Amino acid sequence: MPRTAKKTDAPKEKKRNPATRKYKAPELEKKISEYFSMIEDNNSDPSKEYIYPTIESLQTYLDICPNTWDVYENYSPPTNGDNIPNSIYNYTEDEIDRIKTAEIIKKTSRKILGQLMQEGMKDPKKAALIIYLSKQKAYGGYTDKQIVESSGDVAINVTLKQSGGGDFKR
């Protein structure tokens, strides 16, 4: 006779619906503002250790994980069949809120990176850390790779010399 699992009366943990979000745009904006105020208050007190704003500490303050941050930041509105966004008038209230949330997250990322860069300019010893952070995806993903775009023809003239200094003869 096969074994059957014992049934327990313990309630199952309710899973959060991924379609629901912890923060709507107005509440997220308020919490981010509180975060910056908390840092500002802390840093204005000379007896306390200076705190730098970071995306990671903001995520902790908001009690969201980096994946949730990415989902908020990378939301793109639905499109019609031609990959063209629908008119703003055709979006639902939730879609408009998600668009606003993405804008808030992007602006906040830029604000944090800007503040960190200001700190890096004040103290050159911190420059390497600021460069490192700016290359991380959450801070913009800057790259050192030089991107060269060109169009048109390029002419290259090469002259070969003999070891004695004269030109090669054909």
Image (tube, rainbow, N blue to C red):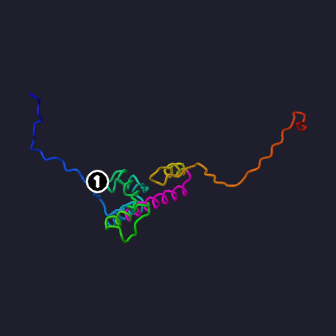
Residue 84, image quadrant:
bottom left
- Quadrant of the image containing the C terminus: top right
Q: Residue furthest bottom?
A: 89
Mark 1, residue position: 18
Q: Is residue 97 magenta?
A: no
Q: Residue at x 24, y 53 (%)?
A: 16
Q: Residue furthest front?
A: 81
Residue 163, image quadrant:
top right
- What secondary structure is the stretch in magenta mostly built from? helix
Q: Is residue 167 left or right of residue 99?
A: right
Q: Residue at x 53, y 52 (%)?
A: 142
Residue 131: x and y in percent read: 53, 51
Q: Residue furthest top?
A: 1
Q: Element under label 1? A: loop
Nearer to the camera, 94 or 154: 154
Residue 90: x and y in percent read: 36, 69
Range of residues picked out in magenta: 100-124
Q: Residue at x 13, y 47 (%)?
A: 11
Residue 88: x and y in percent read: 39, 70
Identify which amino acid the numbered label 1 is placed on.
Pro
